[in-house]
Image (cartoon, grey):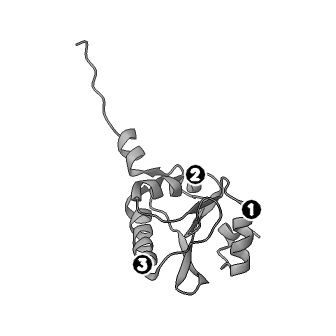
Amino acid sequence: MDWISDNQLLTLADLHKEIALGEDSTRQFKADLRNGESLAAEMVAFANAEGGMLLVGVADDGSVPGLSQADVHRINQLITNVSSQQVRSPLTVHTQNLSVQPDRLVIVLKVPKGIDKPYFDNLAYSFGNARFEGGNG
């Protein structure tokens, strides 16, 4: 099933199947998210390709430490801010908080294939619009 484009909710069994497939160009794992610039770059890459899913609370090795409620609140706020303020054109993304163990959650962040390509993060956008003036000295 194409979880990214059909916006269906994942079950815990679906999550484990996705994790078992490992990381690829449409699926990335993050134990935690703190860097907005890094998140913007991931979102832009997914939107400029075929879309993708970020599983936050899943480590690179496929283990599932999950996130605390406080982490989920902080990361969901970061996702909202990044998708609307650090990506050009702004992206509409979908998140789902999935309970993986008592008091631990995974955030499923789905970034659909973009309809207003190309997308840029603020770093690339700023660089792309920079003006360079040359001289002979």
- Name the disc covering residue 124, or none: none
Name the amino acid type tagged 2.
Answer: Asn
Q: Are marks 1 and 3 in contact (CB under 8 Å)?
A: no
- Return the disc, 2 or 1, that comes first in the chain's sequence: 1
- Return the disc, 2 or 3, that comes first in the chain's sequence: 2
Q: Quadrant of residue 16?
A: bottom right
Q: Residues within 10 Å of mark 2 (few under 14, many from 20)?
A: some
Q: What residue did someone put label 1 on?
A: 21
Q: Residues within 10 Å of mark 1 (few under 14, many from 20)?
A: few
Name the amino acid type tagged 3.
Answer: His
Can the viewer see residue 11?
no
Q: Are marks 2 and 3 in contact (CB under 8 Å)?
A: no
Spatial distance from mark 2 to mark 1, Cα to Cα?
22 Å
Spatial distance from mark 2 to mark 3, Cα to Cα?
27 Å
Of the pair 72 and 6, the residue shown nearer to us: 72
Of the pair 57 and 130, the residue shown nearer to us: 57
| Quadrant of the frame with the C terminus | top left
Q: What residue did someone put label 2 on?
A: 48
Name the amino acid type tagged 1.
Answer: Leu
Which residue shows up at 61% across the image and 71% down it?
Answer: 64
Which residue shows up at 28% across the image and 21% down it?
Answer: 134
Q: Residue 107, image x and y in percent?
A: 55, 74
Q: Residue 73, image x and y in percent?
A: 42, 78
Give the side of residue 72 with respect to residue 16, left or right: left
Which residue shows up at 41% across the image and 79% down it?
Answer: 70
Element type at marker 2? helix
Q: What residue did someone put label 3 on?
A: 73
Q: Residue 86, image x and y in percent?
A: 39, 58
Element type at marker 1? helix
- Return the disc, 1 or 3, that comes first in the chain's sequence: 1
